[in-house]
Image (spheres, helix red, strand yellow):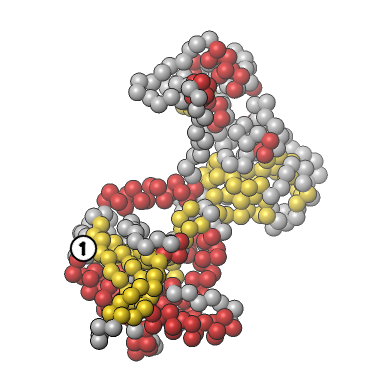
Amino acid sequence: MSDFKLPDIGEGIVECEVVEWRVAEGDQIEEDQPIVEVMTDKALVEITAPEAGVVTKLYVAQGQIAKVHAPLYAYQGESEGESTTQPQEAQEDDHSATHPSQAPSQAFNNAVEDAAELPGAAPPKASGEGVYSDKGKVPASPAVRRLVREHGVKLTDMVGSGKDGRVLKEDVLAYLDQGKTVEAPDKPVSDQSEVRAQGQEPPRIEPLRGVRAVMAKRMVVSATTIPHFHYGEEIDVTELLALRERLKPQVDAQGQRLTLMPFFMKAMALAVAETPILNAQLNEAGDALHYYPQCNIGMAVDSKAGLLVPNVKGVERLTLFEIAREVGRLTASAREGRVDQADLKGGTISISNIGALGGTYAAPIINAPEAAIVAIGKTQWLPRFDEQGVVQRRAIMTITWAGDHRFIDGGTIARFCNTWKGFLEAPETMLLYLG
């Protein structure tokens, strides 16, 4: 048999979550057949079979973490005459079901478990006599470790009855039956049996992983290190909606969908040409600005994997039709969580169309290291006075900018917004700047 090891996906990624196995043990597979979907902190990645054969073992359960360069699954290739012995570190004996879907919290191998380091490596003991492995670690599955944490006890205080001193769930329960729990001061109730005794149901615990985990980290960094300056405005998009309706049949005939996003992006690129500091970024030292010649506009997409912000490259040189095609491609791939790494890198300014979900106002957080982001609210038909004082029905869209106040002041973002607003309220003026 051969072990398929999780390849280096790049971007410094060292682990990922197994989202879905497309095969089961014993299945016949073909070369390039999709085997498993894994979630990195960037996007969903589909891994295919390197050659035809038969799947003999799935090492990592669905919903659990796989490590780069560690065995992901084993298979018998068509060219292999006989099986080889599995590496010791890839074997598992935790009274688990053989298929990950039957025991998602236990079906692991030692290559991917998060073993607890001991202060010093103790000499190995025979199975059932101790808890030390030959590497000075306490072998136990993540489910067992979670149980241990919930009850405030230590793995090092227990005697594992599993293979090589592996601590099993039964060992933890037996230890707890002896009353050896440690209550942390001022710690919320974590014993699920106690919670139920109080007439409550315990919360469902879901680890923060993948895109959501990296979003949490980046938003904290952005909100705590970048002084945000917010600026709100209303834009009359009545003429823009009329223009889109006139152009829509031609775009539909090409198999594309024309939304307002391409207009927002094209107008933004034209406004950036007049106020290039909105397309600049402050270096890490905070002592120099980098002005980017390309306007790579990101768009926040609410995907099943979490918030993704792919960007359309070089908007300043693209036609509306080309932008619409890119927006359609990126939206479709983002909603499936399958955005290419290149589409997520290199953004210079971003748009969050919260209005598509019904929001009127929002205070967006900058997608660092970019300088600004705009949140677009929903469009509403509202009464407005014209130049003669006559009330008319107009399509009004609310927008809110967030700028990096370290180098973008209120006047700068107001002038930039006025330019952008001018192109959107009189969209035919953009024709004067098209190459």
At 37% from the left edge and 66% from the top edge, which residue is drawn? 376
At 73% from the left edge and 44% from the top edge, which residue is drawn? 24
Which residue matches tag 1? 407
Res 296 seen here? no
In the image, residue 147 lies at what x, y percent?
A: 52, 25
Query: Is 66 rendered above or below residue 116?
Result: below
- Position of 411 with respect to 95 (left or right) is left
Res 206 seen here? yes
Query: Looking at this rendering, what residue extends furthest in the bottom direction?
Result: 432
Query: Is 150 rendered above or below residue 286?
Result: above
At 40% from the left edge and 26% from the top edge, which residue is drawn? 188
- Position of 238 with respect to 116 (left or right) is left
Disc 1 residue type? Phe
In the image, residue 316 lies at what x, y percent?
A: 38, 78
Decide which of 392, 17 is in the foreground and name it: 392
Decide which of 369, 412 is in the foreground and name it: 412
Q: How many numbered circles does the render carry?
A: 1
Find numbered disc 1 in the image and state the secondary structure of the residue it sits on.
loop
In the image, residue 54 lies at what x, y percent?
A: 77, 46
Placement of the N terminus among the 4 image quadrants: top right
Query: Is 294 rendered above or below residue 180?
Result: below
At 52% from the left edge and 61% from the top edge, which residue is drawn? 334
Task: Mark 1: give few (<14), some (14-19) or many (20+) Cα within 10 Å.
Answer: some
Placement of the C terminus among the 4 image quadrants: bottom left
- Position of 313 with respect to 278 (left or right) is right
- Quadrant in the picture for residue 166: top right
Query: Looking at this rendering, what residue extends furthest in the top direction?
Result: 178
